[in-house]
Amino acid sequence: MIPLDIFADPVCPWCLIGKARLDRALEARPGHPFVLAWHPFQLNPTLPPEGMDRQAFLQARFGAEAERIHAPVIEAARDAGLTLDLAAIRRMPNTLDAHRLIHWAGLEGQQTPVVSALLRAYWREGRDIGDHEVLADIGASQGMDRALVARLLASGADRDTVAEREAHARARGLKAVPTFIIGNQYVVEGAQSTDFWLQVIDDLAQAQTPPPTTH
């Protein structure tokens, strides 16, 4: 098996699209060699813990371009078979606690389902994934102990661990998400196409196939 380390943030639309494209490839190649692991990276680490109004955030960050930045996202999402409800998203959350939830999900072998649930909650349902009640519900929806998740969120548990992991990634030169690291060797940036991942999987399968024996 080959590790596929993914640095992502649930509020990044290209992480949503990149995951959808990767998922299609993995479904098309059920014998793929990848073991997925998700790693923290905050696009907006300086947001207040409670987040802020999303329209105000977009206006402050993009100014006159705020209304137009979603056009390529909507088109790419449609091509990936995704349905977004941008109008439902009212908050731009600080995602530190969402990354803590992903960290705990990893300890229980539920990382990818929890990441999927976070992306769905934010991009399709417009839920505030910085809110502890929402995060506890998302964890519970994927088989995690809701009461335990709520207690952990209310504490400072693993804040430093998540922050240190992100700082380590930035120190290694990671600047944007999604970023994929294949087999601890190859760095791939951006929301790559399904065809790209199919080719990677096929190339890996070919490399791992032993040569025929001769007599």
Image: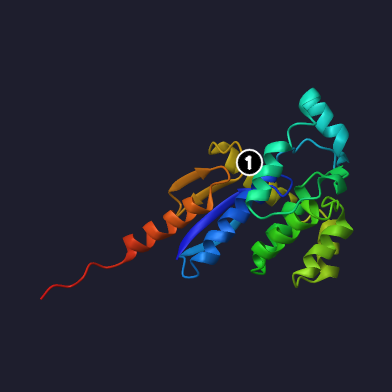
The residue indicated by pointer 1 is 167
Quadrant (top left/top right/bottom left/bottom right) for the C terminus: bottom left
The picture places residue 167, in percent across and down from the top left corner, at 63, 41
Residue 7 is left or right of residue 58, and the answer is left
**Residue drawn 84% across the image and 51% down it:** 126
Quarter of the image where one finds residue 57? top right
Relative image position of residue 111 (x, y in whole percent): 66, 63
Judged from the image, the secondary structure of the residue bearing numbered disc 1 is helix
Question: Left or right: 38 with respect to 35?
Answer: right
**210 in relation to 190, above or below:** below
Seen at 81% across and 61% down, the residue is 152
From the viewer's side, name the closer residue of 42 and 31.
Answer: 31
Q: Say what amino acid the circle numbered 1 marks.
A: Ala
Residue found at the far left of this picture: 215
Question: Up-down: is 119 above or below 49?
Answer: below
| Rendered view: 100 above or below 92 | below
Residue 24 as seen in the image, left or right of residue 69? left
Evaluate whether residue 41 shows in this view.
no
Residue depicted at x 80% and y 31%? 67
Instruction: Tell me where residue 209 appears, x and y as whole percent.
Output: 31, 67
29 vs 143, nearest the viewer? 29
Res. 212 visible in picture: yes
